[in-house]
Image: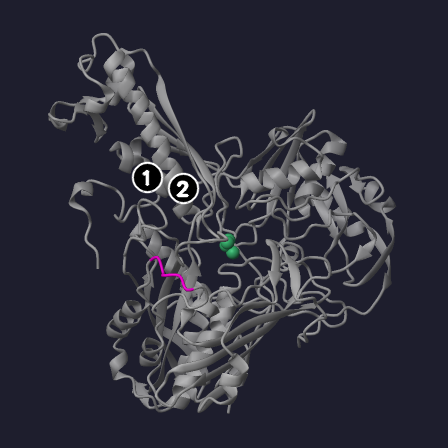
Amino acid sequence: MTTTDPSLSTSPIGRDTPRIDGPRKVTGLAQYTSDYHFPGMLYGVPVEATIANGKLLAVDTAAAEKMSGVRAVFHRGNIGRIFRSTPAPGFDRVCEERRPPFEDDVIHYYGQYIALAVADTFEAAKAAADAVRATYAKEAPNVEAHLEAGNDPPVVLSTYGPVERVQSKRGDAEGAFANAPVKLDETYVTPAETHNPLELHATTAMWDGDSLTLYDSTQGVVNARSVLAQMFGLAKENVRVISKFLGSGFGGKLYPWTHVPLAAAAARQLGKPLKLVVSRKMMFQSVGHRARTQQRMRLGATRDGKLVSLMHDYVYHMSMLDDYHEDCGEATPFHYSVPNLRVSFARARRNIGATADMRGPGAVPGLYATESAMNEIAELLKIDPVKFRILNEPKLDESNGLQFSSRHYVECLNTGADKFGWSRRTPEIGSMKREGLTLGWGMAGAAWIAGTFAAAANLQLRDDGTVRVACATQDIGTGTYTILAQLASQKTGVPLERIVVELGDSLLPDGPISGGSLATSSVIPPVFKAADQAIASLLIVAVTTPGSPFVEHKPDDLALKAGLVFIKTEGPARGVPFGDLLRRANVRLVTGSGSAEMTAFASNPKFSKHSFGCHFVEVTWQPEIARLRVSRVVTVMDAGRILNPLAGRNQIQGAVVMGMGMALFEETIYDRQNGAPINSNLADYMMTVNADAPPIDVTFLDYPDKEINELGARGIGEIGLAGVAAAITEAVHHATGVRVRELPVKIEDLLT
Ligand code: MOS
């Protein structure tokens, strides 16, 4: 474990720091996208296709147009031009459903927008949308759950660029598997899952001449600006996207969906601000979901527990037109030492809405399969699963020969085992009891990417002694406002209550998406550079202002600490508050700007950069009444330096709760008749609720990763979900003897 550098002892970094935006949220002052109202604002409600495959022959809007309060009903014939957006280099203009709304008359999925009713009130718009009649040439939809590999070439396009279908390969995986003394060959299935953040997707669009402003529930204002600018043929500076507070997103709000250009196009036609809020039902249809996956795992090992072959071949479903790649093999090539390995994927097109990033995309379903297979082969070997993992700990990233920037996975495993009491586990099925309940204990490992996105920031030191830090990133509920304030405080010594944070507005310096668990790591370099530049500017004021106590000095002789400017050789005791210096000079503020390039996904990295972790889970099982509960979770994370452990634990606990949902509840089910997601509401799509959540003990190892940024912080938004489902299914097996390899685990699976 590391200890805090004593020279940073007054630093807010590494301290439990309550959210600076907390009071605004709990008092209702925080404005979420759909809370904004503008004079003359109209409401738009989309009309959804009720088939999943076929052609739209006609849209009858006559009845809807005559209804009271209705301003217009838009469709392909009258919406005006909406252009197609295309990807740009460097993680810009990312979009997961590229076809502009209403571009053609082909229906590819249930819920595809076919019209938009606009009225003075939401109620009138909804009634009008319901009154629109569509006729279709209907064909049978393909929503088949079983996935057969499609006929794809060796290299396919994805949202983020071309990818090889054989993702990683070393040695002779087939041959080594054939000759392995102990083998496992099993297929693991994860269902389609739908993002269900509390806040619905919402957009309010308004035009001023050729300038478009969008209040949008987006995890990426800068990216949304680029996409929308292209869709309306505008210069980027003519588009502004604002996203001040989000009721989370889980990846579903990373990139613009079709309702966003639809709202903008309708607002353009009517010359009024227009608000469009996606319904909970539409959230299941037209704003992305996590792909269904089917993953064949073949593991071969020696009898003493050394992996000799690992094959991970998977298929996922995807929509008819889009290219989202569910990268289940993301963590497979480096997680364990194995000389012979192959990771490959195939795709199966379905009549469904676009698949998309969802918390821990790829790696989360992937690690469910790989970690489940690790547990199963450990059982075949009669080796404890913790010990088995330690036996196969790699010395370096065997997929590329690089050293890990910082990897303490074995310490995660040992710490977790100690905290959980794992040594008391008896491996026989149903052998552990407590108070009349059968206990099941299971564990699994986790990994997630690390790095930074390109980012810029601006920092002001002001004459009232306050600091303003600005960056066009977002706070999706994860604590980014607080992190930015902590960073500004770290550099200036100004307490958090005198720091103003501005984010969520594309007018600010370009910031990263709130995604990939990379926002925190990405904003550190630009904020620190901006602070250094602002401080340098302040010190020039200090030595050049007549009457300043520092006029005899050079800027280099001075420093800023705890908000005081002082002479380095004298120390801060006789320092002067920086606000006093600025007031004396009649300077309202000094500013600094900083920016940094993207380091994530580099083509020639020097180190293999990832976070690691593990989960230990206890379930209780009552066979008499078939009741399964998760009763206890211990999680250990090696995620670099943790800037705010309070928010960090909160992130990991939330992710574990979501992992329980993945293991036991969540599943989007498609109707074979019409292709609709049929459980498209919060009663039928089950998620973990408070009553399900057990005590979750989170430990951070807190090793700084100096290859990432100055503070050594990686990210923690997603890794907490990775591995949870594999740990739970292992615990279920330990309690019940039933191996469930298709999520979610259902009670009927356990009735043996
Ligand atoms: Mo995360 S799926 O990158 O919001």
Tell me where residue 520 appears, x and y as whole percent.
Answer: 40, 46
> Looking at the picture, does residue 697 appear above or below residue 625?
above
Q: How many residues crowd around disc 2 within 10 Å: few (fewer than 14), some, or many (20 or more)?
A: many
Q: Which residues are magenta?
A: 401-405
Tell me where residue 214 appears, x and y as whole percent.
Answer: 61, 36
Query: On the rendered structure, is 418 left or right of 109?
Result: left
Q: Amino acid at mark 2?
A: Val
- Residue at horizontal 37 percent and vertical 31 percent from the top: 530
Along the viewing direction, whichever of 375 and 135 lies nearer the viewer: 375
| Res 542 quadrant in image | top left
Which structural element holds mark 2? helix
Per the image, is 594 magenta? no
> Looking at the picture, does residue 717 appear above or below residue 366?
above
Q: Is residue 286 visible?
A: yes
Dominant SS type (magenta): loop
Q: Determine which of the numbered discs, if any, sits on residue 487 in the image.
A: 1
Which residue carries the number 2 mark? 523
Scheme of colours in the image: one colour
Tell me where residue 378 appears, x and y as whole percent.
Answer: 39, 84
Along the viewing direction, whichever of 29 and 139 lies nearer the viewer: 139
> Looking at the picture, does residue 551 appear above or below residue 150?
above
Q: Amino acid at mark 1?
A: Leu
Q: How many residues crowd around disc 1 within 10 Å: few (fewer than 14), some, or many (20 or more)?
A: many
Disc 1 + disc 2, Cβ < 8 Å? yes
| Res 613 quadrant in image | bottom left
Q: Is residue 732 visible?
A: no
| Res 500 quadrant in image | top left
Query: On the rendered structure, is 382 left or right of 110?
Result: left
